[in-house]
Amino acid sequence: MRPIKTPRAFRNDPAPSRWSYRFMRVMLSPVLRRMVFFGIPAAICVGTGAIYFSDLDRRDAISAAVQDMYRSVIERPEFMVKVIAIHGASPALDMDIREVMPVELPVSQFDLDLQEIYGAITELDPVAEARIHVKQGGTLKIDVVERVPAYLWRNGDSLEVLDASGSFVRFAVSRVDYPDLPLIVGQGADKQIAQARTLLAAARPIADRIRGLSYVGQRRWDVVLKNDQTILLPEKNPVQAFERVLVLDQTQDLLSRNISAIDMRLAQRPTLRLAQPTELDLLNTTQKSAETNDQ
């Protein structure tokens, strides 16, 4: 008997080989598939970019191109600030603000550091408050609240102008520059503005006689009058002591007498210091004595 011949198409085993099977199993691993499809292309891109950007000239050229594109956008006419408008400032303060401005016009809105501008303006002594904002049309608007001079403070050899809170405004050359401002003298007087204000308010009945207030020893006040009279006030309750002097002046015309000082430092025992007689007083006294003797 002859053996049955198997067709050639059925001779090869359709099952994969051992190595092929192992390779297929490995490729089914999620980590390996991500590495092949994502990791290797990413590594190629990063490596290519690193090689390309390793050249300094290429980096500079790309940086310059990006910067030019950025500047071309932010420096469009609608984004440019061309004018500074300052409101609420005197001419002198207006000039000072423009001098300390940390920007030069024209400038893009994106290049403005409003916080830096605010700090530069509020560092000026005459400026109490400031508000800054950019208006449409390319205008930087600055609203300023300027300190109002309220007192003239002689501090040693300098003459300083203070506002109602005691904050420094500016230096003064002479008392004549601010004849209407009350004068205060003495070290530390700027820290006691509230008490000085109260004393000046109480002194309204004799406001035309007041020359100024002197802060003595950084603890108490003296009221200096124009006729070389001084009212020495205590450290505690100076206003009440000063009001007692005003009452005595109204009832007994105390301040019109020949007195150089009224010491109220001891409330229970006020002390009067007589003024030294002048040559005219002595002459008048002599004449009166002579007239009395003749009679």
Image: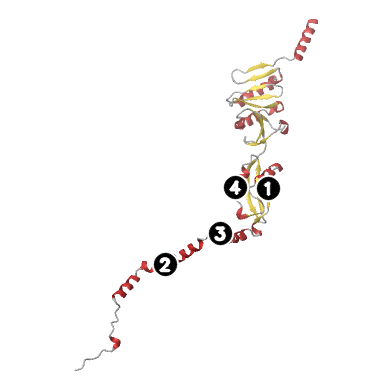
Labels 4, 3: front one: 3
Labels 3, 1: front one: 3
Q: Position of residue 233 (x, y in %)?
A: 62, 23
Q: Which mark is residue 40?
A: 2
Residue 62, located in which quarter of the rendered image?
Answer: bottom right
Q: Position of residue 216 (x, y in %)?
A: 61, 25
**Residue wearing tag 3:** 60
Type of amino acid under label 3:
Asp
Q: Residue at x 64, y 60 (%)?
A: 76
Residue 18, located in which quarter of the rendered image?
Answer: bottom left
Q: Residue at x 65, y 22 (%)?
A: 231
* Number of residues whose C-alpha sits closer than 10 Å to that of mark 2, classed few (under 14), some (14–19) or many (20 or more): few
Q: Is residue 11 left or right of residue 197?
A: left
Type of amino acid under label 2:
Ile
**Residue wearing tag 4:** 116
Residue 158, located in which quarter of the rendered image?
Answer: top right
Q: Which mark is residue 86?
A: 1
Q: Position of residue 153 (x, y in %)?
A: 65, 31
Badge 3 marks a residue whose secondary structure is: helix
* Alpha carbon separation for disc pair 2 and 1: 62 Å
Q: Is residue 79 left or right of residue 56?
A: right
Q: Which is more toward the observer, 82 or 265?
A: 82
Badge 1 marks a residue whose secondary structure is: strand
* Number of residues whose C-alpha sits closer than 10 Å to that of mark 3, classed few (under 14), some (14–19) or many (20 or more): few
* Alpha carbon separation for disc pair 2 and 4: 49 Å
- Residue found at the far bottom of this picture: 1
- Residue found at the far right of this picture: 294
* Alpha carbon separation for disc pair 3 and 1: 41 Å
The answer to which of marks 3 and 1 sits earlier in the sequence is 3
